[in-house]
Image: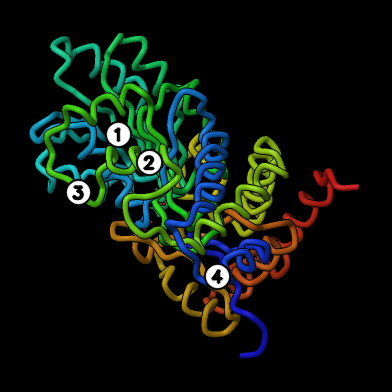
Amino acid sequence: MAGRNHLYIPGPTNSPHEVLSAMHLPMEDHRAPTFPLLLTPVLEDLKKIFRTETGQAFVFPATGTAGWEIAFTNTLNPGDKVLIYRFGQFSHLWMSMAQRLGLDVEFHEVTWGKGIPLDHLENRLKEDTKHEIKAVLATHNETATGVTSDLAGVRKAMDASSHPALLFVDGVSSIASLEFKMDDWGVDAAISGSQKGFMLPAGLAILAFSQKALALTETATFPRCFLDLKDQMAQNALGYTPYTPSTPMLHGLRAALDLLLEEGLENVYARHHRLAEGTRKAIAAWGLKLCAEPGFESDTVSAIVVPEDKDARDVIATAFNKYDISLGAGLTEVMGKVFRIGHIGDMNDVSMLGAIAGVEMALLDSGFDITPGSGVAAAIEYYRSTSTAA
Ligand SMILES: *Cc1c(COP(=O)(O)O)cnc(C)c1O
């Protein structure tokens, strides 16, 4: 098929030309005296993205999943109790990893479409007077359902119960796209990956830890080696890494950080909100509903529920085969029931309209009762009327 495939999944996201070309370079000596000139400023600038001055940023040649494991094994001990709410495939997988690693996992089921229930959290922590819960695991943006939880509210609930548990946040599909304030929210482990808001290929776990969490690396008894933070800290302090880093990806990350910081984080957040809002206008015009319940709508991904007599997989297959656009599938419990449009990363009004037009064609082809042009018209009017460009 002529033209390009249009990528509208919530990760990997589109890589800007600046990032792609920054990675296209000869291999280099990662023990050279000049290597710290690349690594050290990258780690410093990452702290601006996490919004931490007191914490420390890390990059591992891995993915977000490894980030979960790094947080667990470097700060906790086998058998420690952790608290998690399960409301989508990613919170499910995180919970499951905690179980497989031998943590004592207390999980609560929440309707897929909602996020962390703050009242429940506060009451549960108040009840835990012996402070058995060592860490609260918060999935900031549940990518499977397009649900964003209120992290400021999570911190408030933890403070209201004066509970000393660590706060671990899965920010894989939120950090560098949605407002994230590590220091203000008292986050102890912030976990992200390269292929979502950072607009790179998959291949880096991008993390930040509080001093409180880093102090625990001295006592944590989980066996660990490749994912040991202490080895990473010792080498990072000298401007190096404990094993061979992916130098092209570090150059790509440098370029991505430059783009994000040049745009300004507030503008990055506002852009994601606008793109999401236009997508939501289109969804409403089609007469369809989000999986996310009101108040939980994500600005990085929309999961759209299809009527019971339809299969979302048909929409996704038609979109790919006929129009060369990639949409996100419904995962496990929502398979066939939802399809997802990513509005994360290197996107603007017109690329978003490409997604909306393509989805609209695939919906019509799949027999949805919608008015041709209705979603596109709603989004066009929203983008035109809210554009801040001159
Ligand atoms: C993508 C994603 C992950 C998994 O990250 P990998 O890089 O695939 O290991 C974890 N959590 C959330 C919320 C995600 O969106």
Return the residue at label 4: 368
Q: CA distance from mark 1 to mark 2?
A: 8 Å
The verdict on label 2 being within 8 Å of ligand 1 is yes
In the image: residue 103, left or right of residue 359: left
Q: Which of disc 2 and disc 1 is earlier in sequence?
A: 1
Q: Which residue occupies the extreme right position in the image? A: 390
Disc 1 designates what residue?
A: 137
Which residue is under mark 2?
170
Q: Answer few, some or many: residues within 10 Å of disc 1's Cα (few below 14, many 20 plus, some between 14 and 19).
A: many
Q: Which one is closest to the eye, mark 4 or mark 1?
A: 1
Within 10 angstroms of label 3, few (less than 14), some, or many (20 or more) residues?
Answer: few
What kind of residue is marked 2? Asp
At a point 37% along the width and 57% down the height, the residue shown is 61
**Three-letter amino acid code at the position of disc 1:** Leu
Q: CA distance from mark 4 to mark 1?
A: 39 Å
User: In 3D space, how far apart are the residues under numbered discs 1 and 3 (Cα atoms)?
Assistant: 23 Å
Of the residues under marks 1 and 3, which one precedes in the sequence? 1
273 on left or right of 234:
right
Amino acid type, label 4: Phe
- Dividing the picture into quadrants, the one containing residue 216 is top left
Q: Which sits in the foreground, 18 or 144?
A: 18
10 Å neighbourhood of mark 2: few (<14), some, or many (≥20)? Answer: many
- For marks 4 and 1, the one nearer the N-term is 1
